[in-house]
Amino acid sequence: MSFPTHRLRRLRQSPAVRRLARETTLVPSQLVLPLFVREGIAEPQPIGSMPGVVQHSLDSLRRAATDAAAAGLGGVMLFGVPAVRDALGSGADDERGILNVATAAVAAEVGDALVVQTDLCLDEFTDHGHCGVLAADGSVDNDATLERYAAMGLAQARAGSAMLGLSGMMDGQVAHVRAALDAEGFTDTLLLAYSAKYAGAFYGPFREAVDSQLTGDRRTYQLDPANAREGVREAIVDAEEGADVVMVKPALPYLDVLAEVRASVDVPVWAYQVSGEYAMIEAAAAHGWIDRRGAISESLLSIRRAGADAVLSYWALEAAGWLRESL
Ligand code: PBG
């Protein structure tokens, strides 16, 4: 009879030992809640493919932001759903545009209790649904789009956004928006670069959430799911351009990229657990095929373990409640 020399189970023997041996932690301040606000509605509207998530009215948005602050979340990320769209996405930099109006309302409501963040991208505001403006041949015009992002970024900063989420994947967007903000004195406005943002199927439910008009795809600007090195390169370039935080998105299918980005830059790295990740777990749980709380908790912890300093998640508020009991 030989005995094991290494008894790794010793560290797993009881809840107290396991708690002390835990490598990865999650606290509510590491969670950011994405919120949708739709122009011209009085009551929140459910989103079919994201059960439990709604398009907010201005009033219900304010209440949701207050709840997020009370739960100790790190921030909220606001997305606007405008009533009218056009080729240039004019609603994006209009101070009466839904996202800017909502930002001002939320900032007034929560003050400094949360980092109020805004999606800086044209896709919700354009009638063609692309993240930028189109050239005559129908392609997305990178440099013309940068001008639109600068105007949108300034409008969001003026409305009171503390952190701009650059999610459009245009080259040079971080440097361009940074320069525009600095020139107007918004030197403290933070930039969150969605650096390694992959093109793919996991944004499907989000497109319903924002009534996306997109036909076709985003493969000329978002990354090919096959490419990890290219994602790391995007993060390095964005950090050099002045991004305060870089992000990997989606999260769970790209944990390898997340770990590599974490090892390659010194700025904070966040991850976005996107709408498709949300829908998958909700759908399986609704069928009774998976333990909902267990799967959500495990996915959030895994994203942290892979290297995310903070996580954007539609479950942020609910998870913060669990964290008070312990995940
Ligand atoms: C762009 C943007 C998207 C998401 C966040 N910002 C959509 C896209 O790139 O198609 C997706 C988030 C999600 O799926 O939860 N405005």
Image (cartoon, rainbow, N blue to C red):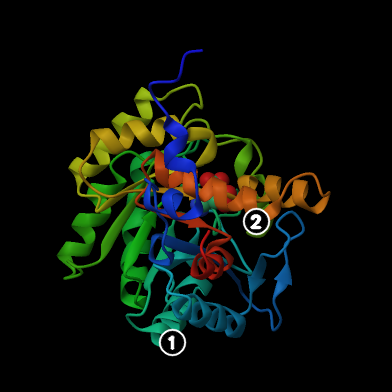
Q: Mark 2 is on which residue type?
A: Arg
Q: Nearer the viewer, mark 2 or mark 1?
A: 2
Residue 93 placement (x, y as % from top left): 41, 67
> Along the line of sight, which residue is nearer the eye, 30 or 101?
30
Residue 158 appears in view: yes
Compare marks 2 and 1 and give the one earlier in the sequence. 1
In the image, residue 155 sits, relative to residue 283, either above or below, namely: below
Residue 301 placement (x, y as % from top left): 48, 48
Residue 2 placement (x, y as % from top left): 47, 13
Q: Which residue is mark 1?
A: 109
User: What is the secondary structure assignment of the residue under circle 2?
Assistant: helix
Q: Residue furthest front?
A: 1
User: What is the secondary structure assignment of the residue under circle 1?
Assistant: helix
Is residue 236 found left or right of 76 in the rendered image? left
Residue 41 placement (x, y as % from top left): 68, 79
Query: Label 1: few (<14), some or many (≥20) within 10 Å?
Result: some
Q: Residue at x 49, y 82 (%)?
A: 66
Q: Residue furthest top?
A: 1
Q: Mark 1 is on which residue type?
A: Glu
> Along the line of sight, which residue is nearer the eye, 303 or 156?
303
> Along the line of sight, which residue is nearer the eye, 95 or 257?
257
Is residue 49 found left or right of 33 in the rendered image? right
Cα distance, mark 2 to mark 1?
30 Å
Residue 88 appears in view: no
Q: Quadrant of residue 262?
A: top left
Query: Label 2: few (<14), some or many (≥20) within 10 Å?
Result: some
Is residue 224 found left or right of 243 in the rendered image? right
Q: Which mark is residue 59?
A: none
Q: Residue at x 27, y 48 (%)?
A: 174
Q: Which residue is mark 2?
A: 293
